[in-house]
Amino acid sequence: MMNNPNPLRQGKELQEFLKTHFGIRCGKKTLPLFELVWRPQIYCDKKNGGNERLSFLGDSILKSVLGEYMFEKFPYWDANLLEDMQERILHHARLGRMAQRLQMEYHPSSEDEDALLLRDHINSDILKAFVGATFLTKGYPFIRRIILSQLKQQEQTIQEIGSDNTNYKGKIIAWSQRNKSEIRFKVNKEIKYNGKILHVVSLYANNEWISNGCDTLVKNAEQHASLNALDTLSIHNEF
C-alpha cells in the first residue's frame, strides 16, 4: 500500500468546493464521508478503506438515473441500444473526463507511475463515490437533480455517442495507414486495482510511444490506448 501523496481537497477547502459547485453544505459530521471520496483505493488497504464502496453505490445510482433519462429522452431506441448506450456513457474513460470537467480529478504525483496509468479509472471512481456520498447525505431526489442537470448539459454529446464509431483501434489503424506509420500494441505490465487485474497496453507508432490504456481485458485496453492516442494526436474529427 502506498501513501496518498496528493489529496485533492480536505477540510474547509472541500466544504467551500461542495457549497460553491453543488450547493452542498457539508458539516463536521458529513465532511469525513466526502473526504473519503478522494481517497483512491490504490492508496488504501481494506482495513483503512478507500472510496471503493462509495463508488459501487454511486455506480448503481448513476445507472438508475441514466436509465430513466434515456428511456424518456429516446423513446424509439430499443432495449439493446439503450443498454449499449448506458455502457458507453458510464465507461471509465468518459466518466473520468466528466470528473475532470467538474474539477473532481485526482492529481497523482509525477513519480507515481501506476496512479498515472490508472488516472481515468481513479477519476471515474471519484465521480461515482461523490454520487454515493451525496446520496447518503442529501438523499436521492437531490443527487438525481444534479445528475439530470449534467445529462441535459451533455445532450448533444450523448446524441453523438449514439452514432459514434467506438472502434477507436480501427480509427487509429486507419490513421496509421493514411500516414504510412507502423503501429503496434504491447502489453507492458499488469496492475492490481480494486481486486481486479488491469492490463496496461502501450501504443507505439514507428516505435515511438504514443499512449497507454488499461483494462481488465487486453482488447479493451487496446481500445482505451487508441482513444487516448486520438486525443493526443487531435484527430478525432478526421473520422
Image (cartoon, rainbow, N blue to C red):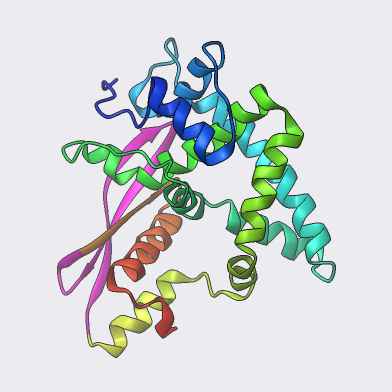
Residue at horizontal 62 percent and vertical 34 percent from the top: 58
Residue at horizontal 35 percent and vertical 38 percent from the top: 106
Residue 44 percent location from the top left of the image: 37, 20
40 sits to left or right of 209: right
Instruction: Check if residue 202 falls in the magenta segment.
Output: yes
Residue at horizontal 41 percent and vertical 76 percent from the top: 236
Residue 8 percent location from the top left of the image: 35, 32
Q: Quadrant of the N terminus?
A: top left
In the picture, residue 233 is in which quadrant?
Answer: bottom left
Q: Is residue 182 visible?
A: yes
Residue at horizontal 42 percent and vertical 45 percent from the top: 103
- Residue situated in front as seen by the camera: 135 or 20: 20
Q: Name above or below for residue 96 compared with residue 223.
A: above
Q: Which residues are magenta?
A: 181-209
**Dominant secondary structure (helix, strand or loop) of the stretch shown in magenta:** strand
- Residue situated in front as seen by the camera: 140 or 29: 29
- Residue situated in front as seen by the camera: 209 or 130: 130
Q: Quadrant of the C terminus?
A: bottom left
Q: Is residue 195 visible?
A: no
23 sits to left or right of 205: right
Residue 115 percent location from the top left of the image: 29, 38
